[in-house]
Image (cartoon, helix red, strand yellow):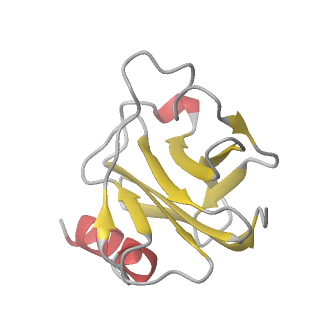
Amino acid sequence: MKVRTAFLASVAPLATAAGLVTAAAPANAAGPCGAGYRLLDPVRPVTSAGGATGGYIYVYWNGSTGENCAVVRPIDAWAGKVDDVAVAISTSTASDSDVSESGKGYRYYAGPAYVSARNTCINVYGGVLYGDVVYTGSYRNIHCD
């Protein structure tokens, strides 16, 4: 469990820098974030220290609501087999109540996590724990709408 503790600690710099809020998409959602969200390009990888890809961060935008949403998924071959998946999203100027996080024992995906981000940039973080290897991705000041 030493690796899992380290993995959860790796989420801390972004996710626990502020109060955490977890949200779920409606059951009848059109996609992982709900109706009205569109996937932004590019999809961002989560990688090991050696550069191997263990999953991807998907960022979505809803122009009507001004919200961004993030979901992390492990690579297809590992779906359901990973030890943990985590995601966090915040505005680039996050205050103590602006970070949304989803994780803690997920095996197929983490999220959706939401942040209201009209006229500002966002930060996203994703992590996948598979065996003894931690795969992470941290992207700051992206999708500056």
On screen, 118 above or below 58? below
Q: Is residue 107 left or right of residue 56?
A: left
Q: Quadrant of the N terminus?
A: bottom left
The furthest residue to the left: 1
Res 54 visible? no
Q: Position of residue 4 (x, y in %)?
A: 26, 64
Q: Quadrant of the C terminus?
A: bottom right
Viewer-proximal residue among 73 and 114? 114
Viewer-proximal residue among 21 and 128? 21
Q: Count the numbered circles shown.
A: 0
The furthest residue to the front: 64
Q: Is residue 86 left or right of residue 143?
A: left
Res 66 visible? yes
Residue in the picture at 48% in, 52% down: 114
Residue in the picture at 68% in, 41% down: 64
Q: Position of residue 49 (x, y in %)?
A: 59, 73
On screen, 16 above or below 54? below
Q: Position of residue 47 (x, y in %)?
A: 61, 61
Q: Position of residue 127 (x, y in %)?
A: 47, 59
On screen, 141 above or below 128? below
Q: Quadrant of residue 107?
A: top left
